[in-house]
């Protein structure tokens, strides 16, 4: 009877130790998504496209601002010549144009930010299959973003590999 109990306990202990050691090793890696976005060919292209869009908008806004300043100076110089009603009417029109300028300025900022976010989202979508393929070929169980890692060995950082693959496989993203 005692031998049976010892046999059962010993069997359970052996079984538990065998099953815990038979699980495969979990391999984890991490990469810096921001670095890949900034340094990849497509990321640099996105940045240039957004900069170009902003420059064009700023040029347009600067022209509008100059025109508003000229109208303001002209109106101030005509203050004594115009009647009070006419002066008030022109001031009201100038304020309306200034409000349109502010609205256009805010719209430009919002649109350029939205375009950047959309382009980055497209980049991440195109990067996901690359990460999946890399994970499979390197037998990785998990790939994390670097910003999620508190401490990790530098050997686990696969940023350069992902950057190379992104440069090879992602050709272009158009900012609209």
Image (cartoon, grey):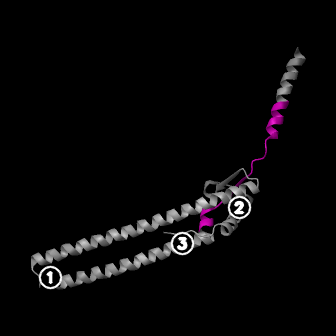
At x 85%, y 19%, the residue is 5
Residue drawn at 19 percent across, 82 percent down: 76
Q: In the rendered image of this protein, does residue 6 appear above or below residue 66? A: above
Pointer 1: what residue?
Answer: 79
Q: Earlier in the sequence, mark 2 or mark 3?
A: 3
Q: Which residues are magenta?
A: 14-37
Residue at point 18%, 85% (across, down):
77
Task: Give the Cα distance between marks 1 and 2.
Answer: 68 Å
Residue 152 in view (yes/no)? no
Comes first in the chain, label 3 or label 1: 3
Please provide percent x and percent y for residue 74.
21, 84
Callout 2: helix, strand or loop?
A: loop
**For the residue labelled by badge 3, is the local secondary structure a helix, a strand or a loop?**
helix
Q: Is residue 92 above or below residue 34?
A: below
Q: Is residue 32 visible?
A: yes
Q: Which mark is residue 158?
A: 2
Q: State the image quarter where residue 44 is shown.
A: bottom right
Disc 2 crowd, CA 10 A, few/some/many (<14, 14-19, 20+): some
Tell me which corner region of the image, top left, top right, bottom left or bottom right, holds residue 147. Answer: bottom right
Disc nearer the start of the sequence (1/2): 1
**Residue 47: numbered disc:** 3
Q: Whole-Å distance between the Cαs marked 2 and 3?
A: 23 Å
**Position above or below: 39 against 33:** below
């Amino acid at each position: 009877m005692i031998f049976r109990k010892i046999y059962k306990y010993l069997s359970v202990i052996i079984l538990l130790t065998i099953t815990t050691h038979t699980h495969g090793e979990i391999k984890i890696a991490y990469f810096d998504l921001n670095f890949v976005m900034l340094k990849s060919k497509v990321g640099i292209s996105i940045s240039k496209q957004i900069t170009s869009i902003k420059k064009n908008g700023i040029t347009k806004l600067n022209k509008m601002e100059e025109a508003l300043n000229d109208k303001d100076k002209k109106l101030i110089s005509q203050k004594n010549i115009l009647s009070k009603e006419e002066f008030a009417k022109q001031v009201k029109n100038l304020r309306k144009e200034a409000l349109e300028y502010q609205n256009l300025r805010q719209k430009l900022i919002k649109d350029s930010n939205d375009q950047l976010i959309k382009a980055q989202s497209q980049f991440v979508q195109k990067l996901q299959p690359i990460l999946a393929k890399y994970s499979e070929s390197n037998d990785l169980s998990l790939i994390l973003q670097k910003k999620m890692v508190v401490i990790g060995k530098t050997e686990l950082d696969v940023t350069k590999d992902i950057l190379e693959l992104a440069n090879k496989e992602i050709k272009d993203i158009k900012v609209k």
